[in-house]
Amino acid sequence: MASSMLSLGSTSLLPREINKDKLKLRTSGSNPFLKAKSISRVTMSVAVKPSRFEGITMAPPDPILGVSEAFKADTNELKLNLGVGAYRTEELQPYVLNVVKKAENLMLERGDNKEYLPIEGLAAFNKATAELLFGAGHPVIKEQKVATIQGLSGTGSLRLAAALIERYFPGAKVLISAPTWGNHKNIFNDAKVPWSEYRYYDPKTIGLDFEGMIADIKEAPEGSFILLHGCAHNPTGIDPTPEQWVQIADVIQEKNHIPFFDVAYQGFASGSLDEDAASVRLFAERGMEFFVAQSYSKNLGLYAERIGAINVVCSSADAATRVKSQLKRIARPMYSNPPVHGARIVANVVGDATMFNEWKAEMEMMAGRIKTVRQKLYDSLVSKDKSGKDWSFILKQIGMFSFTGLNKAQSDNMTNKWHVYMTKDGRISLAGLSMAKCEYLADAIIDSYHNALLYWETPIEL
Amino acid sequence: MKTNQFSSSSSSSPSDRRIGALLRHLTAETDADRVSSVFASPTSGGTGGSVFAHLVQAPEDPILGVTVAYNKDPSPIKLNLGVGAYRTEEGKPLVLNVVRKAEQQLVNDRSRIKEYLPIVGLGEFNKLSAKLILGADSPAIRENRVTTVECLSGTGSLRVGGEFLARHYHQKTIYIPQPTWGNHPKIFTLAGLSVKTYRYYDPSTRGLNFQGLLEDLGAAPQGSIVLLHACAHNPTGVDPTLEQWEQIRKLMRSKGLMPFFDSAYQGFASGSLDTDAKPIRMFVADGGELLVAQSYAKNMGLYGERVGALSIVCKAADVAGRVESQLKLVIRPMYSNPPIHGASIVAVILRDRNLFNEWTLELKAMADRIISMRKQLFEALRSRGTPGDWTHIIKQIGMFTFTGLNPAQVAFMTKEYHIYMTSDGRISMAGLSSKTVPHLADAIHAVVTKAV
């Protein structure tokens, strides 16, 4: 503690009262300043000056990551962690894909070196990732109209794009869905890009407020950026239908807006890489210019390796070259060049036909487990809830998350009474749910929905 | 409907905004890059044109661009002395044995998972990194006054530290040595600090301009931030002596200047981890505060894994706790949490006594080979009777030598001898071998003796 530094064997000593003779007498041995070779007035005055960081306040904990902390602290054996979006097996264990282990073994056997990647990342990865997104034979790829830079997973890729927007489209706004992933706002705030919300979630239907969404996109100033979740919307799990995507593309084109896709779940939502890329490919068909941030955290289980990409589809190869060069200028003073390990894993998996097929199978398995657990939850709710409430919204949602429609008070009841950990917006991660726990969860949801007002005094918004 | 503070209520057209961007860039006083890099095309965008029409091609990064140019050269005698990446005597990249062992251990460990690290990174890595740079018996560590966060190598550590200071420190100016690594000014400018320089290199002696350094730091406003290269100054290879470091420390503490150490070569410069960390430990020993950015790119050969750490030594433990919480707010919107692979390798090596010892031997071998290259180059020039005093080659330390050659001379060496280096005359000794020293000596001899 700070006080121990000043304890030279007695209590408060002002710097000017200290002289070298006094110091020599107090050979406590444990005092670092008596050990230092040159003890001068300058040294002592350094020690007693206050910290330059004294005025810094404690920042609040991250709302999403904080849920796991609380879960860890709970000793109740019924506890269930439906907070963070990381896939869990039926045994509720983290999962490293077999194909990833294979790739890592291969990489070690081959003795790959660890030289710096170019600023734009691993070329083989960049090629593979763009092809996965658009399809290998797609015109935008053949005509070299896509600028692809390896980024630090989804967050890092979004941040590069945000910085590009700030620099080259000053004053342009990004429209984000209400609600959206909590970190989106932080990214645009730190990048100093203005944002506003477009209506998305309708609490009355626990579905999409499509009219509100279209109206708000239409009303935005021409040339705004529209942040869209490519599939498996986070946190609601509510995606537009294919017909709705067409209308969204129409209004965006009409207003000369620039679409900005966040694709964190390609292959993980439906189980099919192509199906989950349909929205992005629709926009590419239109010949539009747009951004796509990709992440391999969930679909390849590479969470901690931080592997993703920012793709910018341009109207010409020349524009793509220039855009790529400017993205590099943003990356260099941020981290110089991206980490090689995750990029190599992806490139190896995608580049080998056998491993690629194995990956697709494992992805189908993960997506399949989530769909199965979703169905079981629905079935449990329907069989246990006698009120006649329509729970079918759960089956209409897709991906890792489900928006339960529970409000804050009800969500608190889930945690306080039932030891079910989730985020306060009513989001549960189905990836953290096992078949074995579905009935328990159904009980908790039914109780919280109907009775939370009786248990807790916080008013509920209807 | 929510918006943030950057949103304005007026709706301007895209072409208006692009003209605005052009005006803004033309009237900007700093960063000449921005002026040259914006071209507004008011009629572009909308139907037919590109919304990116106003983006021009950025020039290649001056340092990394050297390798790009080298790769394009078909000459069989080409030599890459650009980027600071270690090469063996055979001219090959090196992955340390101890790193391979650590990786094997990681791959064999079936319990390993790839879950997100905390925002501050791998805890064990952070603790071990702090001990490595500050010393295992550091009072600052014992007293819990240090916060250490895993970052993306040296660059990432500097950027996160810079962003933190720009938000929370009362003085927004950082002084960097003249010259310094080319990426430093860009990192700190984008972090939100204003960048000034202090005199460092003396071309006439090819050594340290100590008087100028003391004068410039002495004239800096109270509390200013000062970037210090912990050892093996990049690009000059000129380091202060310990006596000079002590004077720097006294001066800085008397003016409340905040030290921000860049430690990219611990163990790689002299061959000794403790020797290379001495200047930092001197500053910690006086009880004051400082920041240090650590990189494992060179000393563990983990370049592409992007492993590093930012440590902030504070006056008190509770301050360190609050500082850490604010560092997390910088990191989360930048990349959420750092990559696990490189940090795991470092942790395996640092925590195991045998692997650690093996590492120190491999590190010394790399440092020794570089010192040997210095001697060989010096001898080669001496034996050729190349005019001039070349003792700086053996006096300078670390990966780089500041040859003293000017850009025109550098261009000549590239064109005629296919030798690639940065235009400031910096050569990477790590890229030399006994076989290629004669070629380099010939080139230097030629450029120095040729009629201008």
Image: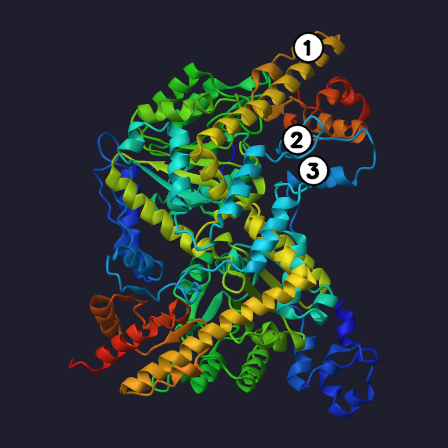
- Quarter of image, res B19: top left
Residue B372, how many percent across, how many down? 44, 77
- Quarter of image, res B346: bottom right
Mark 3 vs mark 1, CA separation in Å:
28 Å
Q: According to the image, label 1 marks what residue?
A: A389
Q: According to the image, label 3 marks what residue?
A: A67
Q: Residues within 10 Å of mark 3 (few under 14, many from 20)?
A: some
Residue closest to the far left: B451
Q: Secondary structure at mark 3?
A: helix
Relative to B192, say whether B390 is above or below: below
Q: According to the image, label 2 marks what residue?
A: A88
Give the foreground label among 3 and 1. Answer: 3
Q: Which residue type carries mark 1?
A: Lys
Q: If you read the primary sequence from the N terminus, does the residue marked by circle 3 or circle 1 appear first?
A: 3
Q: If you read the primary sequence from the N terminus, does the residue marked by circle 3 or circle 2 appear first?
A: 3
Q: Which residue type carries mark 2?
A: Arg
Q: Secondary structure at mark 2?
A: loop
- Quarter of image, res B392: bottom left
Residue A253, how many percent across, how many down? 32, 25
Q: Secondary structure at mark 1?
A: loop
Relative to A364, say whether B84 is above or below: below
Identified at 33% across, 88% down, the residue is B389
Q: Let me know if marks 1 and 2 both belong to one chain.
A: yes
The quadrant the C terminus of chain B occupies is: bottom left
Identified at 22% across, 77% down, the residue is B447
Which chain does the numbered disc 2 sit on?
Answer: A
Q: Residues within 10 Å of mark 1 (few under 14, many from 20)?
A: few
Identified at 45% across, 81% down, the residue is B213
Identified at 78% across, 81% down, the residue is A13
Give the foreground label among 1 and 2. Answer: 2
Task: Compare residues A189 and A268 and report the one nearer the observer.
Answer: A268
Q: Which residue type carries mark 3?
A: Val
